[in-house]
Amino acid sequence: MSRLANIQNKKKESNPLKDWYYSVPAKDLSEARNLIVEGCQINLYTFYAWLRGKNQVPLSQQRTINIIAGKKVFDVPELMTLADISNS
């Protein structure tokens, strides 16, 4: 596969964190970033690696980001409760 084809394929991949983060008003970007860094207990390097798509956001952190964002940024399954497990 050519280098151009690789670049075009990468553009097709979605990055929900990047899509949401850049939809936040510019004046609130640093606050959103800081909330994610603190809430996910990560450093800025990891945050920007997630934002650029270099590293995948772990499932547990996807849930945390959804809570911080106040909307469904990532399509993750809801956590099961003990009642759900006993009913299965």
Image (cartoon, rainbow, N blue to C red):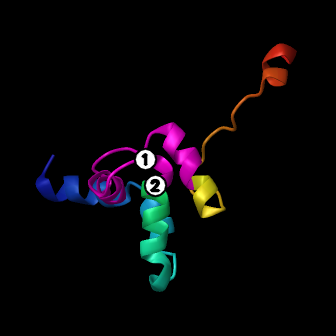
Quadrant in which residue 5 is drawn: bottom left
Q: Position of residue 54 (x, y in %)?
A: 27, 50
Q: Residues within 10 Å of mark 2 (few under 14, many from 20)?
A: few
Image marks 1 and 2: residues in contact by CB distance under 8 Å = yes
Q: Amino acid at mark 2?
A: Glu
In the image, what residue occupies the spot 49% across and 68% down?
Answer: 32
In the image, what residue occupies the spot 73% across and 28% down?
Answer: 80
Q: Is residue 49 magenta?
A: yes
Using the image as rendered, state which of residue 77 and residue 39 is in the foreground.
39
58 versus 23 height, above or below? above
Residue 74 is at least partly visible in this image:
no
In the image, what residue occupies the spot 43% across and 47% down?
Answer: 41
Q: Amino acid at mark 1?
A: Gln
- Image: magenta residue range: 38-65
Using the image as rendered, state which of residue 39 and residue 1 is in the foreground.
39
Disc sitting over residue 41 in the figure: 1
Residue 77 is at least partly visible in this image:
yes
Quadrant in which residue 73 is drawn: bottom right
For residue 81, side relative to residue 29 (left or right):
right
**Secondary structure beneath label 1:** loop
